[in-house]
């Protein structure tokens, strides 16, 4: 039974039953400006289980708008593990992990993550966003420097801002420019380089081997965010660092349990002394309630399944490659996409929304992505492919994209 998605409100102005209080009246203008620029976002409600198909506004569509890359988000095996742990330990974690929220389920999860990545230790956060925004300020501060790819995820950007270190933004995947920026930067106490490994809007992959080289030459810390690669890349499924053979050169790996693993939460993994340091300094770990033990148990189960079902990631990546080749043969612009995230770049926000609507008419849910998620003039529709999609589904999608 496919799930159903509908707009929470069809008419955004329907919310304004009463005028805004005077100190907030500027919000009306802010929303009007967004509307005039085709940047109002729909607020959608999903009914039913995650799966290959969704019902959107009464139409059954192929779901290309979820990060459920391996089909585990709706897998009853995760639900069973979650309910078992919830029954045993109660639903809520009750406190931050520092105080008393760190249960046996969380301990098992951290061990499973460390094993999967082949590192000494891991630390679980309530979300990947929290992991990034807490870890960067735990590593660098005023007087330090952090260098960040221009297409990095919002949580890395916020982490950089929160740290108060000086921030250098380097062009997307441009290690030569990064090297020049590092050479030109004044001597600081510490230097950190941060990058997504698989970029969430473009489907491009970071040049990890070159980043390791440049970090080594400049004595910099290298931190890689595997949010979209965890479970999908690497012989063991730990991500692109493993796939690229760069485990020694990447000092800190972040990942999420909420995308391919189908559960929720984020993690940081690496040397046990690094993890010990984060337990004393990462504010989102110290001051935020641990996520529920049932969620930790579901994530542990997903890691086990990633180990047992390698065919899911292999098949997903094969189908994604065939799909990208079909788009290329049809002269569609997917930029430098190299994985299961496949954008079609169209330019203006209105064009992306129009294409997304046209695809919905043809049976596909492929969301429009607009600024600030992408730079101005680079609006796109983004197909997130899942192991649940068949070859036939993706052939039909490629045809529909041509129109
Ligand atoms: C989704 C995402 C995150 C945040 O992970 P959540 O667990 O969803 O909070 C962090 N980094 C990147 C690159 C992401 O795409």
Image (tube, helix red, strand yellow):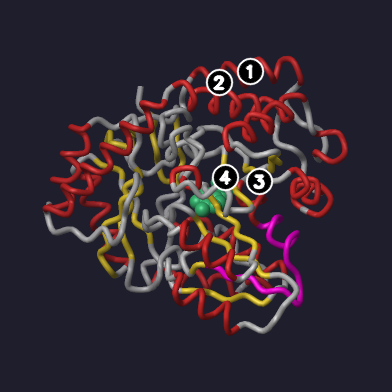
Residues tagged 1 and 2 counted as in contact (Cβ below 8 A): yes
Decide: is 144 above or below 119.
below
Residue at 76% of width from left, 20% of height from top? 89
Task: Please state the total of marks drawn on the protein image.
Answer: 4
Question: Which residue matches tag 1?
Answer: 83
What separation in Å lies between label 1 and label 2 (alpha carbons)? 6 Å
Image disc number at residue 255: 4
Among the two numbered marks 3 and 2 on one chain, the one whose residue lies closer to the N terminus: 2
Vertical order, 182 against 259 (above or below): below
Name the foreground residue: 80 vs 58.
80
- Location of residue 373 (image quadrant): bottom left
Q: CA distance from mark 4 to mark 1?
A: 24 Å
Quick check: is 134 in the magenta stretch? Answer: yes
Image x and y of residue 59, in percent:
27, 36
In this view of the protein, which residue sits in the foreground, 111 or 88? 111
**Residue beneath label 3, please?**
268
Q: Is residue 3 magenta?
A: no
Whether disc 3's CB lies below 8 Å from ligand 1 is answered no
Instruction: State yes or no: discs 4 and 3 in contact (Cβ < 8 Å).
Output: no
Where is mark 2, residue-wise? 79
Give whichever of discs 3 and 1 has the lower sequence position: 1
> Which residue of the protein is positioned furthest toward the front in this rendering?
217
Q: Is residue 358 above or below residue 194?
A: above
Q: Position of residue 126 (x, y in %)?
A: 68, 42
Q: Please name which of the two marks, 3 or 1, marks the residue nearer to the observer.
A: 3
């Amino acid at each position: 039974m496919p799930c159903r998605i509908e707009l929470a409100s069809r008419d955004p102005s329907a919310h304004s039953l009463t005028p805004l209080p005077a100190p907030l009246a500027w919000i009306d203008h802010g929303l009007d400006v967004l509307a005039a620029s085709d940047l109002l976002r729909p607020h959608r409600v999903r009914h039913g289980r995650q799966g290959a198909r969704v019902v959107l506004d009464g139409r059954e569509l192929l779901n290309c708008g979820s990060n459920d890359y391996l089909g585990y988000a709706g897998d009853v095996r995760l639900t069973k593990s979650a309910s078992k742990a919830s029954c045993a330990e109660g639903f809520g974690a009750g406190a931050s992990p520092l105080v008393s929220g760190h249960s046996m389920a969380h301990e098992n999860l951290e061990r499973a993550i460390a094993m999967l990545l082949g590192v000494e230790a891991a630390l679980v956060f309530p979300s990947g966003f929290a992991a990034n925004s807490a870890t960067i300020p735990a590593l660098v501060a005023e007087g330090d420097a952090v260098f960040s790819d221009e297409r990095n995820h919002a949580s890395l950007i916020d982490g950089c801002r929160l740290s108060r270190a000086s921030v250098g933004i380097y062009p997307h995947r441009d290690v030569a420019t990064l090297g020049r920026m590092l050479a030109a930067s004044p001597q600081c106490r510490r230097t950190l380089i941060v990058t997504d490994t698989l970029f969430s809007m473009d489907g491009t992959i970071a040049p990890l081997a070159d980043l390791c080289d440049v970090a080594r030459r400049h004595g910099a810390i290298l931190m890689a965010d595997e949010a979209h690669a965890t479970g999908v890349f690497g012989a063991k499924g730990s991500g692109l660092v493993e796939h690229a053979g760069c485990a020694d050169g990447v000092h800190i790996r972040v990942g999420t349990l909420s995308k391919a693993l189908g559960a929720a939460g984020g993690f940081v993994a690496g040397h046990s002394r690094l993890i010990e340091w984060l337990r004393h300094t990462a504010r989102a770990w110290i001051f935020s309630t641990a996520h529920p033990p049932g969620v930790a148990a579901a994530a542990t189960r997903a890691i086990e399944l990633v180990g047992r079902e390698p065919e899911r990631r292999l098949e997903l990546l094969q189908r994604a490659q065939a799909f990208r080749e079909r788009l290329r043969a049809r002269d569609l612009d997917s930029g430098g996409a190299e994985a299961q995230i496949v954008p079609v770049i169209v330019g203006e926000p209105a064009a992306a929304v129009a294409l997304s609507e046209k695809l919905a008419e043809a049976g596909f849910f492929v969301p429009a992505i607009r600024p600030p998620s992408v730079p101005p003039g680079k609006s796109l529709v983004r197909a997130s492919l899942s192991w649940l999609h068949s070859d036939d589904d993706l052939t039909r999608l490629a045809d529909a994209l041509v129109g």
